[in-house]
Image: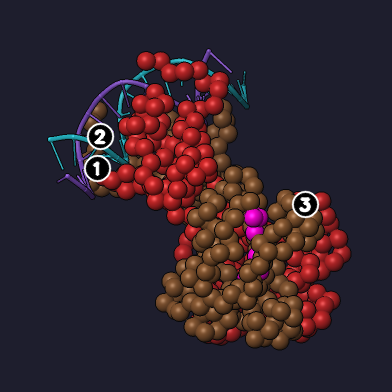
Chain colours: A brown, B red, C cyan, D purple
Amino acid sequence: MPRSPVTSEPQYLKVKNHLREGIASGHWVAGDLLPSEGALVGLFEVSRMTVNRALRELVQEGLIERVQGVGSFVAQLHRISSTLNVRDVHEEILERGHQHEARVQALTKGKATPQQAAELGLKRGAPVFLSLIVHLENGVPIQVEERAVNPACAPDYLAQDFTQITPTHYLLQVAPLSEARYMIEAALPGEVEARLLGISRRDPCLVVKRITYSRGVAVTAVRLTHPGGRYQLQGSFSA
Amino acid sequence: MPRSPVTSEPQYLKVKNHLREGIASGHWVAGDLLPSEGALVGLFEVSRMTVNRALRELVQEGLIERVQGVGSFVAQLHRISSTLNVRDVHEEILERGHQHEARVQALTKGKATPQQAAELGLKRGAPVFLSLIVHLENGVPIQVEERAVNPACAPDYLAQDFTQITPTHYLLQVAPLSEARYMIEAALPGEVEARLLGISRRDPCLVVKRITYSRGVAVTAVRLTHPGGRYQLQGSFSA
DNA sequence: GAGTGGTCTAGACCACCTT
DNA sequence: AGGTGGTCTAGACCACTCC
């Protein structure tokens, strides 16, 4: 049988939306058994591959779970999981239509502290590149970036002009990102951070720590300190 | 032609991994044109649908971008985007193998403040249900949960025993989650939060604000205050 | 017109779970 | 054995972009 015209909504989306609406409306609730692929094939008069694609995508979106030999079920929605973007400050500020300025406070070679060594998988005291940069949005400091870089991954790090390109951007060019771990916490700023941000040491800060890897090797460990009053992480989730 | 045995790795994964490795190793860098579907069909001797699935999943994972009529390209990896789970405290604590206790400090009907009204899409002064609960992990307070609930969505909210079931859990049962917005910031605790957490008003806190929707209607707005030293959000990303 | 991706079919074999 | 999902094929038509 020839398929229906393509000008309209794709068939797999019709199947997806049918299930999505049924779940959003409470027609099926968490744990319920959904119609089988075969049943949906009959209902929508499409091929099994089409139904299968719809269901696979719903799994990917976390809305349903499937068990081979058993069936498809509405997923437990107890977690609100959402994509959080930890972006390059430069892009983020430009996107808000504001001016970005970076002040390089330090850019040197140093010896890895025990913590830096552990984070980067180096030996204690091994050489590391260190940078300390303040990022300003329309002239107001919003982020202190303290970074340790594995010299093996970016030998020319110290020769870059980080008023023109952010370390994040540069490192992504040099070492393709394969993995990242991050941690978000609230903390008081150290003396240095407070001075660079122009805030009191009693003002709370949002601190993001991040270690990024390329081809299984730790490239850089960074600590981003933001004044609590001037920076928020935001996100949304939609089923 | 019959396809090769299924016992081994699926064919679409072979294609995916081939491209993934090429990108991770720097063989292709951001912006590069990847082989066309047809070329990959020839290279792996599989059908086009199989290659297509591999490529679609790589798009979904943010590793590549595709343009109809033009080709497939390595995506710009400037953002580190990751799934951040904002979980039910109860589950989270149990998963760590610890004891969870909830102390209900208040559970009442009140009038919406202007902010609550705006968040829940109600009129100022409209009735709302309010709850104030402290969550403890092994006896140590780690979260103050201040919540406003739209009575239309959960008429029996005030009759629940929130020492036995968390509001998050209860509300998800009553009103299927369809959307959520959240915001994460660092702030100092108010007098109430500091007292309930047993910390000083000068100790920084990680504050998560979240509004959740069901079928397009705002169900609840919550403010979760965590002592900075005792709570972190964590995540990881992998290409 | 040639090449690309977007979607779809009508079958197929397999692995898995339940009975 | 019968139903379920997991994967795969060898075609097909379409929309889009580039030359």
Of marks 3 and 2, the one in the foreground: 3
> How dense is the environment of label 2, judged by Cα within 10 Å: few (below 14), some, or many (20 and up)?
few
Residue type at mark 3?
A: Lys
Residues marked 1 and 2 touching at CB (< 8 Å): yes
Rounded to the nearest whole Å, what is the CA distance between mark 3 and mark 2? Answer: 63 Å
Mark 1 element type: loop
Rounded to the nearest whole Å, what is the CA distance between mark 1 and mark 2? Answer: 8 Å
The picture places residue B173, in percent across and down from the top left corner, at 61, 56
Up/down of A75 relative to B1, above or below? below
Residue underneath mark 3: A123
Sequence order check: which comes first, mark 3 or mark 1?
1
- The answer to which of B56 and A200 lies nearer the viewer is A200
Mark 2 element type: loop
Residue underneath mark 1: A6
D15 sits to left or right of A56: left
Check if residue A147 falls in the magenta segment: yes
Say which residue appears at 36% left-offset and 44% top-offset.
B33
Q: Are discs 1 and 2 both within one chain?
A: yes
Hey, which quadrant is residue B220 in on the image? bottom right
Q: Are discs 3 and 1 both within one chain?
A: yes
The segment highlighted magenta reads A145-151
The picture places residue A146, in percent across and down from the top left corner, at 66, 69
Q: Which chain carries label 1?
A: A
Mark 3 element type: loop
Q: Mark 2 lies on which chain?
A: A
**Residue B135 bears which disc, if any?**
none
- The answer to which of B218 and A2 lies nearer the viewer is A2
Residue type at mark 2?
A: Arg
Residue type at mark 1?
A: Val
Q: Main secondary structure of the magenta part?
A: strand
Check if residue A18 falls in the magenta segment: no
